Image (spheres, rainbow, N blue to C red):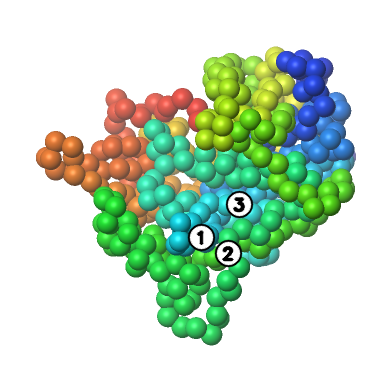
Amino acid sequence: MEQLPEADAQSLGALRYREPHHADLPHLVSFSGGRSSAALAFMAAEEGLLRPERRDAVLFANTSAEHPGTYEFAAECKERLEAEFGLPCFWFEFCTVEDAWRGDYWRRASYRLVKPVPVEQDSDGYRSSGELFEELVSLQGMLPNPHSRTCTAKLKLYPSHELIGEWLGATEGPAHAGHHWQPDPSAGGGGRSRQGLIDPALVAERYSRRGGTASAESALRRAQHLASLPPSRPAQRWPDFTGAPLPPAGHGARPVPMRGPGAALHVRLLGLRADESNRVGRVLSRTLFAEGATTASCTVRTQPPGERPYFPLHEAGIDAAGVIGFWKGRDFDLDIPSGAGNCVFCFMKGTSSLVELGTKPDARRSAGTPSDMGWWSDFEMRHLRTAPRRNGEGLSRFGFFGVNSATFADLASGRAEADGRYANGTPACDCTD
């Protein structure tokens, strides 16, 4: 057998809790699918920092835009964490459901647990062709951009808050979401009779009446896409989505509150490293506002008031080189090109970097999916929004890079302004926060 290279010794050491009682709170690891958060999960499990009996767990939010290698790596991590340490590792996704509000039916955000296999192989599997971006933009009517990173907030953070509320409540699993009306499979036509209770034409008309700036055609197309999706998400059971042994569910258990003064306390372990002090500082500053919330509406939405973030890699002095050292000698690793990241063509990387990345060979890229720049170009053009300028002179164009900026079509053609506003990227987003 080939001898693996010796790994650099890495250790988290004892975690210094800001309050002694934090040691007794459930610990939840935010796993992005990358090396740093994966190293954190394995180190914490190996050193006894994570304890399943405390309802500790690892959470992976799928955006449907990860690199194919990320899905393989995340699946391997899940299997090993559950088999070797009995630690539940849940994959989950954003989804929408129909629900009643103020005498009418609307589409609202929810989430679902998924298995680490493609949805094409199992109806409970994960999506990887940009479906969740399509659903998100159809719901909110605008593309994510550097000033409104809704892909992070709505595809990762908000769904995780819902999941945590049900997990910490010792429920049997995510409760049914949406109404209970079942579509008639024998009914023909579109809209209301085919899938749910919402008429896409009425949704588009309501959007226009309220001053929406997108075209009527665009508004109707988005509403029709949402109407084609399932109107509800059936109840799910935790044991169906993890191979780890689970603590018993409570009799009549209900989700714990995640907002307001009674928000459930829990420790969130984040894979920010010693060379990411600015990001650590930003999260801790945000924590001051979150912990100071006194009502359900007065809070920082991206961070529940009961969340207590900790950064074991940063505290232990482990930087990017240290993470690479951790994976030396391991018999598996993340197999993606250097610089690709998990979300390969994230607009936060900067237009210059994206043009360069688009020219690099990558045999794992799949045409028609977010691992290929062409998908981002087509998606952006389909959802590009224009609106009259405030001075009344002409139209403003809103895309992934903000107002009247470069588009992915420009980048796919190798065009990027060297001195453009987003040429060199913007501060790292909160994908792992």
Q: Residue furthest left?
A: 393
Q: Are marks 1 and 2 in contact (CB under 8 Å)?
A: yes
3 or 2: tag closer to the N-terminus:
3
Label 2 CA crowd tier, 10 Å (few <14, some 14–19, many 20+): some
Task: For residue 335, say whether it is visible.
Answer: no
Q: Dot 1, crowdedness within 10 Å: few (<14), some or many (≥20)?
A: few
Q: Give the secondary structure at mark 1.
A: strand
Q: Is residue 130 above or below residue 260?
A: below
Q: Which residue is mark 1?
A: 100
Q: Which residue is mark 2?
A: 179
The CA span between labels 3 and 1 is 17 Å
- At x 48% / y 56%, what residue is drawn? 101
| The N terminus lies in quadrant | top right
The residue wearing badge 3 is 111
Q: Quadrant of residue 202?
A: bottom left
Q: Are marks 3 and 2 in contact (CB under 8 Å)?
A: no
- Residue located at (50% from left, 70% from top): 196
- Residue at screen point 68% across, 48% down: 91
